[in-house]
Structures are given as C-alpha cells and as structure tokens.
Amino acid sequence: MSTSGTTPAPASSDVPPRFAEALRELGLDVEVRRFPDATRTAAEAAAAIGCALGQIVKSLIFEADGVPVLVLVDGASRVDVELVRRELGAGKVERARADLVRETTGYAIGGVPPFGHRTKTRVLADRGLLGHAEVWAAAGHPHAVFRLAPTVLVELAGGTLVDVRERTA
C-alpha cells in the first residue's frame, strides 16, 4: 500500500480540537494522516491513501422525519435511502443539507468523522464495512484520515449493524 505524499500527524495535534478530544476520551492512539490535497470524496481518499475504494468509510448525515441520523457505508457503495427509511421506521428520509451536517456534527461535509460529533445521533453502520481488515475514515478535516479495524470503528461510533447499501442488479 502506497502512502507517499502523506504527513503523519499526532492524534492530539493538527486535527480539529473536537476530534482530538474524542480520540482522547475514547483512549484511541491512531495516526492521523494529512494530505496536501483534499480527500473529500471516497475516490480522492482511496487514491491518496493507496487503498481500495471499499476501505474508505463514508460518514453521511441524513434526515429521518427531520431528525439527523449518521449512516456509515463503504466508499464503493451508495446508501439506499428506502432501506434506511425502513430500518428507522421513518416516513421520510433524505440527505441532510450542508448546514445541518455542520450543525449536527461540528464538521464540514468531506471531513465528517464517524464519532466525536457536536450532538449525539443515531448511527447506522452498513455490514459491508466488516468485509475489510481495516478501513479509513475522515479525521474531522477534508485533508485528514485515520485507519481503524471496522468492528472497532462501528463500536466506537455506537453504530447498529444494518444492510443499507444499494444492491447492484
């Protein structure tokens, strides 16, 4: 796996204070990697890291009947909003607007980590994440990522394992 172009950063510095605090509270000592170019999209992150697209964790905020919910899915998949709606028993589910994402999580789209958010939200984690030995997630900034075992990531995020990714025909 190529990691050229990365700058290792200690977990306690060079990351947003909210995320650094979450790492401390969870007792996590992870290497946060920063890149000169944004890793906002799963494809950009996978290319920068040198890993498979499916090893990227997308942390997506949806609104279920007006209530924010975090959905974690691998970078090679798309979320099936109808499956999310059924899982939550909601009447309506849609992608959250950028301002709601920032208000809920404290982070901008492209840098939303799977935990360490401003407010506590329900978390759905797609089972597809467990198909990898390690995954990479945003570290609170569009240029920063960290690596973790998917089972640990889901547990720390307080996620419920579900099947919410779109199925290909």
Image (cartoon, rainbow, N blue to C red):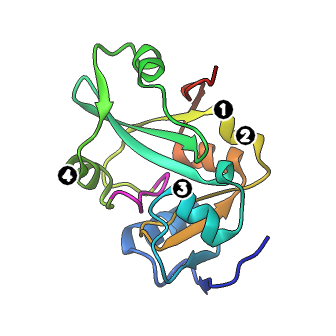
Residue at far front of view: 169
Quadrant in the rendering for residue 122: top left
Residue at 28% over, 13% down? 91
Cα–Cα span, label 3 and label 2? 17 Å
The span from disc 4 to disc 3 (Cα, nearest Å) is: 21 Å
Question: Reading the chain from its start, which is encountered first: label 4 or label 1?
Answer: 4
Q: Residues within 10 Å of mark 2 (few under 14, many from 20)?
A: some
Q: Which residue is mark 4?
A: 99
Instruction: Specify which label sits upstream in the sequence, 4 or 3.
Output: 3
* Residue 32, position as x, y percentages in the image: 58, 75
Q: Earlier in the sequence, mark 3 or mark 1?
A: 3
Secondary element under disc 3, as helix, strand or loop, is: helix
Boundaries of the magenta span: 109-115
The Cα–Cα distance between marks 4 and 1, rounded to whole angstroms, is 28 Å
For the point 80% across and 51% down, which residue is it?
A: 133
The answer to whether residue 149 is above or below residue 169 is: below
As displayed, is residue 48 above or below residue 101?
below
Amino acid, disc 4: Asp
Distance from disc 3 to disc 1, alpha carbons, whole Å, reads 18 Å
- Front label number (3 vs 1): 3
Mark linked to residue 42: 3
In what element is the residue under mark 1? helix
Q: How many marks?
A: 4
Q: Residue at x 66, y 70 (%)?
A: 49
Task: List the residue tagged with mark 1.
Answer: 127
**Circle nearer the N terminus (2, 4):** 4
Disc on res. 130: 2
Give the left or right position of residue 51, taking residue 20 as reference. Answer: right
Q: Position of residue 112 (x, y in %)?
A: 41, 57
Question: Label 1 amino acid?
Answer: Arg
Q: Give the amino acid at mark 2.
A: Leu
